[in-house]
Amino acid sequence: MSDNTNPNFNLSDIFHFLGVAVCAVLTFYSTIYVFYGNTLIAGFCAVIALIVPYLIVDNMKRLKQDKELNKSDNTTPEMMLGGIYFVVVFLVLFVFHFHFIEVEFSKKDDIKAAGLNKVKELKDLKTAYEQSVAQKVNDFNTLFTTNFNNIKTADRTSRASFIEKLQTELGKGIDPIKLMDMPNDPSTAQDLEDARSRKEKTILQSYEQEALHKEYEEYTQNAQSVFDNWQNMKVAYYYNDIQNMYQTLLQAYKQKMPEFAYKETLTTNSAINLTSPISSLGNASAGGWLIALVVLLVMHFCILGKYLFAERPEVGPKLVRKTNNGSKPRGSIEIR
């Protein structure tokens, strides 16, 4: 096949490369959302979106300017490549590109608000656990104070039952004989305060989540920043992963405190599913469709401009193969 393309670089070529570049960028950012912020997969998809349109349109232009094909009026290869472009580049990529435009221009505020609410729910879970731990400490201190006051005010006969209760709460470290004989002595009060303090530390240590909470603090700071500043390279990852962190925290809390009762999952919902381009098509507003169609039609016009504005070469007499209709022999050729 002869190559009759014009070697000069013209305006349609510039717009073609701009359109292909926009196609690759839109593909990259849309697949960033779909694949949870995986830049490797998104980068691979962007390269494909860069190469495929270029190759299809470049070959469509070559076929359009091929003298032999024009001489025989054979446009079938052009039409086949045009069909491939329509299905692969326009229809398939349209779903992803529409998703990106819908997220960025129509649903961004909703997703941002939903993401920040998820972060808040995560913080609320930690706060609820810390409040439960604090309540256990308060319950212990209340019981300690009540029993100690009863010991000081009760007669010797009744005092024994209160001392037993206090021993149950404090464990080791108190002198029951001293409590029985000198409940109001300052040294007795100090001994009990030391025992109370040790017990309180034991309670706190039994519910400690230091390593997990260190990870949690870093995680929530990053997630808060991602949504506050709309870091679209990370939005999809945190938007979908917060549920995993929520479950990790909840399970760790219930392991330390089986009676800890809290909602089992996040309750925040968004108007759009970041990882599902199809959902964008179903939930888009009329304005969203208008913006997407204008942007994408202009982009595809730029990509196809290299082919559309390429001139067909002037050819001499065309060769037309006649069919066997009775007037010409089979396979005869007419020059016109």
Image: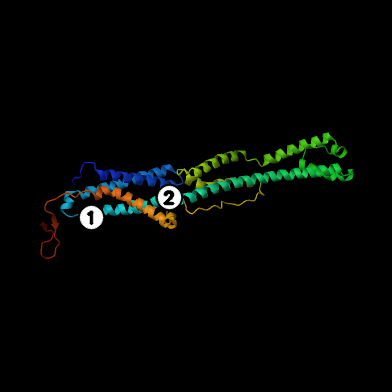
Proximity of marks 1 and 2: CB atoms separated by less than 8 Å: no
- Residue depicted at 29% across the width and 45% down the height: 15
Q: How is the image coloured?
A: rainbow
Q: Could you say where residue 88 lies in the image, as x and y percent from the top left?
A: 33, 52
Q: Amino acid at mark 1?
A: Thr
- Residue position marked by numbered label 1 in the rendering: 76
State whether residue 245 appears in this view.
yes
- Residue position marked by numbered label 2 in the rendering: 105
Between the residue at mark 1 and the residue at mark 2, the CA separation in whole angstroms equals 40 Å
Asked where in the image residue 172 lies, by quadrant, the reply is top right
- Residue depicted at 55% across the width and 48% down the height: 118
Number of residues whose C-alpha sits closer than 10 Å to that of mark 1, classed few (under 14), some (14–19) or many (20 or more):
few
Q: Could you say where residue 121 lies in the image, as x and y percent from the top left?
A: 58, 48
Asked where in the image residue 141 lies, by quadrant, the reply is top right
Q: Looking at the picture, tell me which residue is in the foreground, 61 or 252.
A: 61
Q: How many marks?
A: 2
Query: Residue 216, which numbered label?
Result: none
- Residue depicted at 43% across the width and 48% down the height: 104
Q: Of tags 1 and 2, which is closer to the observer?
A: 2
Q: Could you say where residue 13 lies in the image, as x and y percent from the top left?
A: 26, 44
Q: Secondary structure at mark 2?
A: helix
State whether residue 48 appears in this view.
no
Using residue 197 as the reference point, say whether residue 263 is left or right of it.
left
Q: Amino acid at mark 2?
A: Phe
Q: Secondary structure at mark 1?
A: helix
Q: Earlier in the sequence, mark 1 or mark 2?
A: 1
Image quarter (top left, top right, bottom left or bottom right) of the C terminus = bottom left
Q: Looking at the picture, tell me which residue is in the foreground, 180 or 277.
A: 277
